[in-house]
Image (spheres, rainbow, N blue to C red):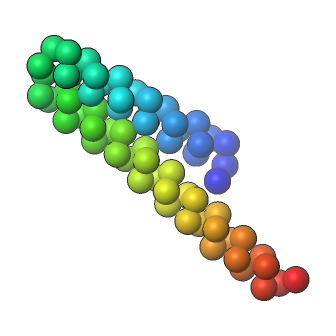
Amino acid sequence: MGLDDKIRNATDKAVGSAKKAVGDATDNRDLQAEGTAQKTAGTTRQAGEHLKDAARNVGDGFKS
């Protein structure tokens, strides 16, 4: 996973959490949903990147 991907995923997770918290505090369901969706997207992309990294590492192990 590249550094830019890590930063983007971490940013999405943090901003999503903040939006959800503000939505919770203000009882704004749209903001709650938007925050949850953004945090989930960041988490999902991060998990996908980890899977790609793991698959690459397994493949590299067979090349030795």
Image quadrant where residue 3 sits: top right
Q: Residue 15: x, y in percent? A: 40, 27
Q: Residue 30: x, y in percent? A: 14, 29
Q: Residue 37: x, y in percent? A: 28, 41
19 lies left or right of 7: left
- The residue sitting at the right extreme is 64
Q: How many marks?
A: 0
35 lies left or right of 46: left
Image quadrant where residue 16 sits: top left
Relative vertical location of residue 51 with respect to residue 30 in this rendering, above or below: below
- The C terminus lies in which quarter of the figure? bottom right
58 and 34: which is toward the camera? 58
Image quadrant where residue 4 sits: top right
Residue plotted at (28% across, 22% down): 21
24 and 37: which is toward the camera? 24
Residue plotted at (58% across, 59% down): 50
Q: Residue 6: x, y in percent? A: 59, 43
6 lies left or right of 44: right
Residue plotted at (72% across, 79% down): 59
Residue plotted at (63% across, 73% down): 55
- The residue sitting at the top extreme is 26
